């Protein structure tokens, strides 16, 4: 008997086909029984197997039995195939040109020097918001968040942006801290020094002939704040504490 995912242990339905001992399986029912224009279910039943070789094979159908049959047929075809892998993504995932299976068969591609590329527009906005500062909110805390905050800080430093080390004490998510004001000031001055309105139009902040950051003209918080800042005559957001610039 295959290994059934733990959330289904109490489910009364059980698979009927011969799965391998170490296949991990799961299934699910549609949340809605709505039909499309052709009378086919919009959300089908599904059945998935995660074989030990490291992939996911999914079957779909009008019933769980149909979905299991569909999945089993695909799994047999995958196993019988003499795969011919081609690289699909940089992550190392391969796609079989013969049977359509996907599996992690390649070493991931690591882009050399990716650390040193200019900030993207999203990172510029994160700098503007002082996102390197830890927060008390549990959903935004933990090792993964610590790593991404540290990465942002390092990326700013590598791009020559003099951002101070963030405080170690977490802040309340909605609190505007001195660190955040400092970061807003750094991001706005960066935009000013790197071209201001021209930089926004061009989509890049250029300092000393080098692209330091990209800008997302339509979406950016930094660009929005820049317009208010310019209208107000460029007061220092750090010392004047002008919240009209920091908050919509
Ligand atoms: Zn194949």
Image (cartoon, grey):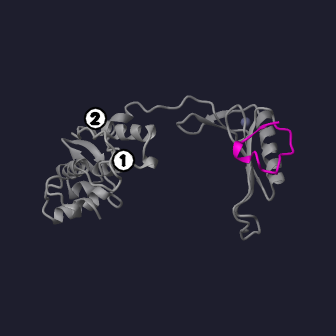
Residue range in magenta is 1-19
Q: Which residue is mark 1?
A: 135
Query: What's the distance in space between the residues labelled 2 and 1, CA to CA?
Result: 24 Å
Please state the quadrant of the image where ligand 1 appears. top right
Left or right of 88 on screen, residue 189: left
Is 43 covered by the magenta stretch? no
In the structure shown, which secondary structural element does the residue marked by tag 2 occupy? helix
Quick check: is 4 in the magenta stretch? Answer: yes
Instruction: Identify the residue at horizontal 32%, vertical 52% (top origin).
Output: 125
Quick check: can you spot residue 174?
yes
Quadrant position of residue 211: top left
x%, y% of residue 171? 32, 48
Q: Is residue 48 visible?
A: no
> What residue lies at 21% left-to-right and 53% top-to-bottom?
188
Q: Please rate how many residues cluster around mark 1, counting C-alpha atoms within 10 Å: few if below 14, some from 14 to 19, many from 20.
A: some
46 to the left or right of 210 = right
Sequence-wise, which precedes: disc 2 or disc 1?
1
User: Residue drawn 71% across and 42% down?
Assistant: 5
Residue beneath disc 2: 158
Element marked by disc 1: loop
């Amino acid at each position: 008997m295959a290994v059934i995912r733990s959330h289904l242990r109490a489910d009364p339905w059980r698979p009927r086909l011969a799965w391998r001992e170490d296949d991990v399986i799961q299934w699910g029912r549609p949340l809605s029984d709505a039909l499309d224009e052709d009378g086919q279910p919009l959300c089908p039943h599904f059945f998935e197997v995660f074989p030990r070789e490291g992939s996911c094979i999914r079957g779909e159908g009008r019933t769980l039995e149909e979905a299991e049959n569909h999945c089993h047929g695909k799994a047999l075809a995958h196993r019988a195939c003499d795969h011919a892998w081609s690289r699909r993504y940089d992550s190392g995932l391969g796609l079989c040109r013969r049977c359509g299976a996907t599996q992690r068969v390649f070493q991931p591609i690591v882009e050399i020097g990716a650390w040193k590329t200019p900030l993207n527009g999203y990172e510029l906005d994160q700098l503007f918001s002082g996102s390197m500062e830890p927060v008390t909110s549990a959903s935004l805390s933990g090792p993964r968040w610590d790593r991404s905050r540290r990465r942002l800080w390092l990326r700013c430093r590598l791009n020559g942006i003099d951002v101070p080390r963030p405080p170690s004490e977490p802040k309340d998510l909605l609190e505007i801290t001195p660190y955040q004001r400092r970061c807003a000031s750094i991001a706005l001055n960066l935009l000013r020094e790197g071209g201001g309105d021209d930089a926004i139009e061009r989509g890049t902040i250029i300092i000393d002939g080098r692209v330091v950051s990209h800008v997302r003209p339509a979406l950016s918080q930094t660009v929005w704040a820049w317009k208010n800042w310019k209208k107000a005559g460029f007061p220092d957001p750090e010392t004047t504490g002008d919240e009209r610039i920091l908050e919509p």
